[in-house]
Amino acid sequence: MDSSVRLRFAPSPTGPLHIGGIRTALYNYLFARKYGGSFILRIEDTDQGRYVQGAEQYIIDCLNWVGLVPDEGPGFGGPYGPYRQSDRKPIYVEHALALINKGEAYYAFDTGEELENLRAANGGNQKYDFVTRNQMRNSLVLSEDETNRLLKAGLSYVIRLKVPENQEVQIEDIIRGQVIFKTTELDDKVLIKSDGMPTYHMANVVDDYLMKISHVIRGEEWLSSTAHHVLLYRAFGWLDQMPKFAHLPLIMKPTGNGKLSKRDGAQFGFPVFPISWQPKEGESLLGFREFGFEPEALLNFLALLGWNNGTEQEIYSMEELIQAFSLEKIVKSGARFDFEKGKWFNQQYLHQKSGFPFIQRIKDDFINNGIQVSDEIAVQIFDLFKDRVLFFKDYLQLGKVYFLELESYDSEFIIKKFKPEFISVLQSVSEILNHLEFWNPEQIEVALKEFLKSAAIKPGELFPLLRVLISGIPTGPDAFKMISFLGREKMVIRIYKFIEFINTKKQEA
Ligand code: GLU
């Protein structure tokens, strides 16, 4: 147990969380749990222009669904709140003023037009830095009196970080090793915007410090921002309490180059969001939950997207993941998103399920879809299909044909495989089944195998045919189990309905 280990997941509520966000949350969670520390949710909503209604609740719903429940956060309590940055505005302003007093930050009064001119003079790049700041309207250039006069007059201003000249910023990243930035390449980032709101950099660093964050685990896209973050820790005099950084590899598209984007779901036909999201009325972006994923399977899949402990093991319980996880074993290169692999994980998880709560879940799903089943029938459904399901919803998909009228038969099978002499074969099968003494898969098997021997028909012809007339398609579980599960009466009816169907087709032809 180490209460000084404090990890935070710090999403911005600018839309639905990408699946990579859940991976980031998971790695933070695993690390915190491994060392008995805390997992904190902080909502970084200082960019009011990009704020999206409902996105914060969506983030919380996603974390709850996958079971990564924060120890501290908005709505979760904790000693370092508030955990929503828009509720902490005065804290950032106070800290920015402290930096101005130390000579590490300054007021900048430049108008939009002046900044445009700066951009134009720099070939489209508005680099407000240790050179250009001397040509602009800010408190480094203006006299103290003039600065105070402008502030009193209520002129719009921002507060900028005074990046030191010609220095190096070294980052010891746990995953990437040493990364060095030169301050000559860095601009004087805005810390407080003209609306009084902090920028990401300011709020992020102040909060990580005040919330006593020990490790920052986040996506690779934030690596370049870290240079400014280190400069802020230096400017505040907090270097000895700076968190350790670990920047995660990107999640790449299934094919080609480039990172998996929020738009890729539609293009590749798989979900990229944890749960479905409605950007507007009548539009919905598909989630893993709605696609049918078990949350544990999704987490296991994501855990291995960029991390492996050097063994062949792929299936981990949450406890095993917590024990095995280490930042040192995270790969540097991008991790390719393989949706088929994700489905495989789901299948493996469904295979592991058994027992009462799971049977109850199957039963509830049937009942909710208007099919009344008993516990006993639910157990049979489980046994019949457990080796064939990829997703939980497949139990209903595969099972409902036994309870409802069959809508159609696989026409390709009938055209290619059906022979007229099969009609009398089916009539015999119906007779045999109708007179069977005991109704169970074993008896059905004995009787049908005996029949196969006497009639000149191959098992490879009879069983696909029986499956088609039971479920519509020639593939499926063990035919004897299918017949037994369907029940004697229904089986006889289905044989006759099929014969009737064939006869009608003949007359039509
Ligand atoms: N608010 C940032 C995001 O949306 C957080 C980055 C960080 O973890 O520092 O991902």
Image: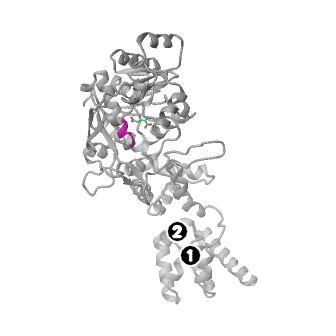
Q: Nearer the viewer, residue 475 or 35?
A: 35
Q: Main secondary structure of the magenta part?
A: helix
Image: 258 above or below 55: below
Mark toward the start of the polypeptide (1 vs 2): 1
Q: Is residue 392 visible?
A: yes
Q: Is mark 2 within 8 Å of ligand 1?
A: no
Residue behind mark 2: 482
> Relative to the observer, which residue lies in front, 432 or 427?
427
Q: Quadrant of residue 52?
A: top right
Find disc 1 in the rendering and name its residue: 466
Q: In the rendered image of this protein, does residue 355 appear above or below residue 438? A: above
Tell me, what colour scheme is on the image? Answer: one colour
Q: Image quarter for residue 489?
A: bottom right
Magenta run includes residue 230 = no
Label 2: few (<14), some (14–19) or many (≥20) C-alpha neighbours in 10 Å: many
Q: Amino acid at mark 2?
A: Met
- In the picture as drawn, the residue positioned furthest to the right comes out as 508
Q: Position of residue 333 (x, y in %)?
A: 32, 52
> Is 121 above or below relative to 318?
above
Label 1 crowd bin: few (<14), some (14–19), many (20+), radius 10 Å: many
Which region of the structure is painted magenta?
221-225
Q: Quadrant of ligand 1?
A: top left
**Residue type at the position of mark 1:** Leu
